[in-house]
Amino acid sequence: MPELPEVTVISEDVAALAKEREVLKAAVFRPDVTNVEPEEFSRRLVGRTLRGTGRRGKIIVLDFGDVVGLVHLVISGRVLRLPKWKEPDRMNTAVLEFGGEGEPVVLAFTRLWLGYFDLYEPGEEDAHPLISRLGPDPFSEDFTVEHLASALERKASVKGLLLDQSVVAGLGNIYVDEVLFASGVHPTRKGGTLTREEIQKVHAATRDILGRAIELRGTTFDSYHDAFGETGKYQHQLKVFTRAGEPCLTCGTQIVKSRVAGRGTYTCPSCQPL
Ligand SMILES: [Zn+2]
C-alpha cells in the first residue's frame, strides 16, 4: 500500500506528465469508484485544466480549478501512463486523457477496487471523512515534538498510534517500523511511556526517513511503481522491514517478526528493548 513517500512521488509524476493540460476524456469503470455518477465524472472533468497536484496524508489531490479530485490508491493501486486512450476496465479503473502540445497523455488510475477517485468542489474536500480527521503532515510546521508528545500520551502501543492518521498523516506499516527502529523504541511500548528524548528521536526519524524515501522514489515490494513505470529504490535502505531472521545491521542480533496493532512488525530485540 502506498504510504506518504510513494503517494508524493506519484502525485509529482502526475504533475510532470499532465500539469497545465486540458482533460479531453474522463471515464470510470464502475460507479462505486467515485462519489458521482459516471456521466457526471466525465462531464465535470472534461474541458478542465489540471492546475497542479498535491497530497493530503496518503491521498492524491488533483486541482482542476473548479473541481478537486481525490484519489486514494489502496493495496496495489497505481497511476500508469497508457500509450493511447483505452476505455476503463477492471484493471484501469479510471482513465483520463489530457490534450496539449505533442502526444496526448493518457493516465490510468488502476485497481481502485478498494480505493476511489472522488470529485469535490474546492474546499469541500476538507469535509471528506479521511481528510477531516487527518493529523499534521510530517513536513508541516504543525508537526512539532509537542504535538507528537501530546498525541502519544495514551495507553495504546506506539506503533498503533503512529499508524493512526489523526496522530500524523501519511505513515503506514513499512515506515513506522523503520522509524521505531531508528529511534530505538519497541513498537509494543505504550505511547505514554516514551521519554522526551525518545519522542524527539521519533519526530526526527519520521522526517528523515520519509524525506530519504521520497528522494529514492519510494519503496517497491511487489506492485508499487511510479507513474513512469519505474520501481522505487528505498527497499534497499530498509533496516528491519521484511528482514526477519537476518542480522540487525547495527548490532548483529536477529531481526524478529511479530504482530503489533494487527500488522506484521519487524524489530531488533537488542536495539529496541522492551
Ligand atoms: Zn540491533
Image (spheres, grey):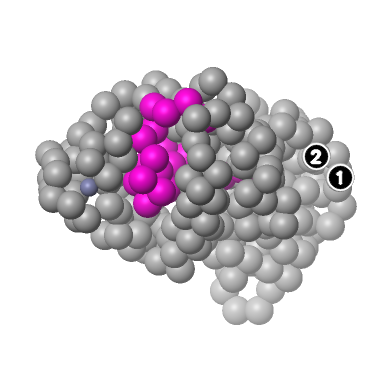
Q: Position of residue 135 (x, y in %)?
A: 68, 39
Residue receiving disc 1: 123
- The CA span between labels 2 and 1 is 6 Å
Q: Per the image, is 8 magenta?
A: no
Q: In the image shown, does 53 or 263 lie closer to the viewer? A: 263
Q: Amino acid at mark 2?
A: Asp
On the rendered image, what quadrant is the C terminus found in? Answer: top left
Rendered residue at 69%/73% (across/down): 100
Is the CB atom of the residue marked by disc 1 within 8 angstroms of ligand 1's nearest atom? Answer: no
On the rendered image, what quadrant is the N terminus found in? Answer: top left
Rendered residue at 69%/56% (across/down): 140
Q: Position of residue 129 (x, y in %)?
A: 72, 29
> How many numbered dots are placed on residues in this image?
2
Q: Position of residue 253 (x, y in %)?
A: 14, 44
Is the CB atom of the residue marked by disc 2 within 8 angstroms of ligand 1's nearest atom? Answer: no
Q: In the image shown, does 232 or 235 lie closer to the viewer? A: 235
Q: Is residue 95 left or right of residue 121?
A: left
Above or below, 259 relative to 79: above
Kindly identify which numbered label has been placed on residue 126: 2
Secondary structure at numbered mark 1: loop
Quarter of the rendering containing residue 164: top right
Rendered residue at 57%/74% (across/down): 103
Q: Position of residue 181 (x, y in %)?
A: 35, 46
CB-based contact (under 8 Å), mark 2 and mark 1: yes
Would you call the spot at circle 2 few (<14 residues within 10 Å), some (14-19), or many (20 or more)? Answer: some
Q: Per the image, is 187 magenta?
A: yes
Q: Looking at the image, can residue 36 be seen? A: yes
- The stretch in magenta equals 169-191
Q: Looking at the image, can residue 96 be seen? A: no
Q: Amino acid at mark 1?
A: Gly
Would you call the spot at circle 1 few (<14 residues within 10 Å), some (14-19), or many (20 or more)? Answer: few
